[in-house]
Structure formats: C-alpha cells, structure tokens
C-alpha cells in the first residue's frame, strides 16, 4: 500500500540556519503531496502542497518540490526562526491520506 | 470561522469505562476521519466516513466504533478502553472526500486520552 517515510528527528538548528527535512513516498498512480505542521498543543495545519510532478509548493518561506523520478517531497527553508519550532508531517493523498511519522524541529536563538 | 471541534481536549479514564470523543465540523464537509498519533508512528487512521451513514475501517480500527448520523458530527466511541489506547486523537474533515486531488484536510486540536 501507499506509504510515506520521513527523516527521523528530532532536528535542532540555530536561528537562520538552513533546514531540510527529507520525505520519500511509495504510491501507485499520481498522489498529491502535502506538508502539515503541528505547533505545540494544536492540531495539524496545512503548510504547503503539490498536486503533480515538478510542482513546487511554498508558504511562509518553506518550499517543497514534487519529484516523481525520486519519489520525494523534501521540505526546505533557507533561514529558520524560533517560531518555526514544531512537528512537521509529510503526507500523501491518493485513495486515502497517509502520513509520515513526523519530524520535530527545534530552533534555538 | 471554519473549524473542526473536538471534545474533550484531555481525558483520563479507567480501563473498561465506555467513553465518547465528539467531533464536529462547520464546513459542510462530506468526508471525516479519526486518527491516533503515537510517538514514532505518525498519524494512523482509525475510521473514516465518506458521508452520512457511510463509515469504513482505517488501519487501526480495533477497539473503536464510530457513527455518522448527521453530516457535521463524527463521534469516536471506545466501548471498553484499554491502556494501549492511550494516545493523542485527531479528527479531520475534508470536502468531497480524498478521492479528489487538491483536497486539504482540516484538523481538530486533538484529544489527549489516558487510560489507566
């Protein structure tokens, strides 16, 4: 069945550092891909999405490009802030929604 | 304001005592779903519903029941809770179901359940 694999955390960075969180997927057909963010004590919020190959999703300085040839959707941000500290989930949507295990990011001042 | 509302947010209960976690959405969404979130496992789907009176099992349905008598509500029922059901639970809703591309899921704030 469909599945999503994320890099394991936790990830700790200093403010203004470059962020990459790897995400790869296994799916039949042409899934849509998402990154969700979960701030402490809150539910998941959609961060960005891409619905077809080579699409780039972007929001709040975060970007991810749908790479069908490598079945990947890595999340990147050029300069992280303390307020970006959260848990990030990669997800795919095909016949159903599948989530990765989540990656906890902590950004220190 | 568009939202998915879960209640309660926190619950501590004893083994075997039936409980219900409510979920309500105000977006007229057809699709609703329950997930549990456990460390290292991400979100796993418990049950989902494509529309009123239509429910189906997800990946981890054992020990849970759901009902969808009206579009806005999708309660999760634990008839006889056990300690392995201690987890963080999320309800989600979406328009037109996940069979359609470009569909975003909206999540509730979560219910942290502890079964002792």
Image (cartoon, helix red, strand yellow):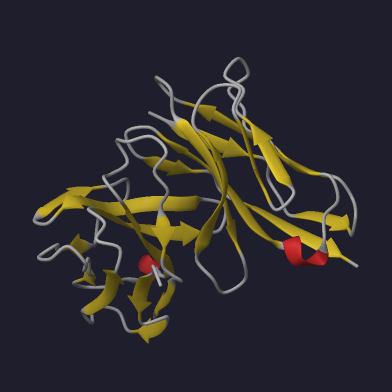
Q: Residue at x 9, y 65 (%)?
A: B69
Q: Is residue A82 above or below residue A10?
A: below
| Quadrant the N terminus of chain A occupies | top left
Question: At which x and y percent is residue A11?
Answer: 77, 53
| Residue A4 placement, left or right of B92 | right
User: Where residue B98 sits in the image (x, y, percent)?
Assistant: 32, 41
Work out which residue is located at the far top of the displayed protein and give it. Answer: A69
Q: What residue is drawn where x is 62% and y is 27%?
A: A72
Q: Is residue A80 above or below residue B22?
A: above
Nearest the viewer among A40 and B5 is B5
- Relative to residue B3, is residue A5 drawn left or right? right
Q: Is residue B93 above or below residue A28?
A: below
Which quarter of the image is occupied by the C terminus of chain A?
A: bottom right
| Residue placed furthest toward the front | B1
Residue occupying the point 18% across, 48% down:
B56
Q: Position of residue A85 (x, y in %)?
A: 73, 63
On screen, residue A16 above or below A27: below
Query: Is B116 in front, or is B87?
Result: B87
| Residue B93: % across, % down | 33, 57
């Amino acid at each position: 069945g469909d599945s999503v694999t994320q890099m394991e955390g936790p990830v700790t960075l200093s403010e203004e550092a470059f962020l990459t969180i790897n995400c790869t997927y296994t799916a039949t057909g042409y899934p849509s891909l998402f990154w969700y963010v979960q701030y402490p004590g809150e539910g998941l919020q959609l961060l960005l999405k891409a619905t077809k190959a080579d699409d780039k999703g972007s929001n709040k300085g975060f970007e991810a490009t749908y790479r069908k040839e490598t079945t990947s959707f890595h999340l990147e941000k050029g300069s992280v802030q303390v307020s970006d500290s959260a848990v990030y989930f990669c997800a795919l949507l095909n016949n159903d929604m599948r989530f990765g295990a989540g990656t906890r990011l902590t950004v220190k001042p | 304001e568009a939202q998915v509302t879960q209640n309660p947010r926190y619950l501590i209960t004893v083994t075997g005592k039936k409980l219900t976690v409510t979920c309500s959405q105000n977006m007229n969404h057809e699709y609703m779903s329950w997930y549990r979130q456990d460390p290292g496992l991400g979100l796993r789907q418990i049950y989902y519903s494509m529309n009123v009176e239509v429910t189906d099992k997800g990946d981890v349905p054992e020990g849970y029941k759901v009902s969808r008598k009206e579009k806005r509500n999708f309660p999760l029922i634990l008839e006889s809770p056990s300690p392995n059901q201690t987890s963080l639970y999320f309800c989600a809703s979406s328009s037109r179901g996940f069979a359609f591309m470009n569909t975003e899921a909206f999540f509730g704030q979560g219910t942290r359940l502890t079964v002792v």
